[in-house]
Amino acid sequence: QVQLIESGGGLVQPGGSLRLSCAASGPTFSRYTVGWFRQAPGKEREFVGAVRGLGGNTYHYADSVKGRFTISRDNAKNTVTLQMNGLNPEDTALYYCAAGQSIILSRIRTDAAYSYWGQGTQVTVSS
């Protein structure tokens, strides 16, 4: 069982930055693929980015955030962070981190592939 807690959301002006953190419980966290997803009001949940586990630590990003968002992972601290730069109003959403084991590459962008979810943290980009 893995428990995930997100933090770091808030209100930021367009062009600004935020850093979200996902803190996880469990001794085998390094084995898990960790993904970030977001859901805006009236829209479906969408993939933001992910980092694979099992020592691979390869990173994957949605085209909409590539070059602006960066995921990092610290297995010693059981945390994954999402650094968000160049935020715009379209980035406004509830952001979730999620974790799962044995997620094949073709499903890494699929929310159904992840077994564990945090409660979400709100990011609002507005002037």
Image: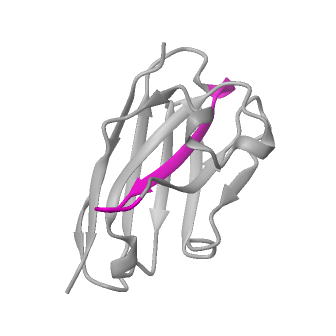
Above or below 12: residue 83: above
Quadrant location of the C terminus? bottom left
**Which portion, as a residue range, is magenta?**
30-43
Q: Residue shown at 69%/44% (left/top)?
A: 108
Magenta span has 35? yes
Above or below 43: residue 95: above
Magenta span has 33? yes
Q: Position of residue 34 (x, y in %)?
A: 58, 39
Q: Position of residue 67 (x, y in %)?
A: 62, 76
- Towards the viewer: 111 or 1: 111
Q: Residue shown at 37%/73% (left/top)?
A: 17
Q: Position of residue 37 (x, y in %)?
A: 48, 51
- Towards the viewer: 91 or 16: 91
Above or below 74: residue 122: below
Q: Is residue 125 left or right of residue 20?
A: left
Q: Is residue 50 left or right of residue 5?
A: right
Q: Is residue 54 left or right of residue 35?
A: right
Which of the 4 quarters of the picture holds residue 48? bottom right
Q: Residue shown at 62%/64% (left/top)?
A: 62
Which of the 4 quarters of the picture holds residue 66? bottom right
Q: Position of residue 72 (x, y in %)?
A: 58, 51
Q: Is residue 100 left or right of residue 94?
A: right
Q: Residue shown at 32%/85% (left/top)?
A: 14
- Towards the viewer: 56 or 123: 123
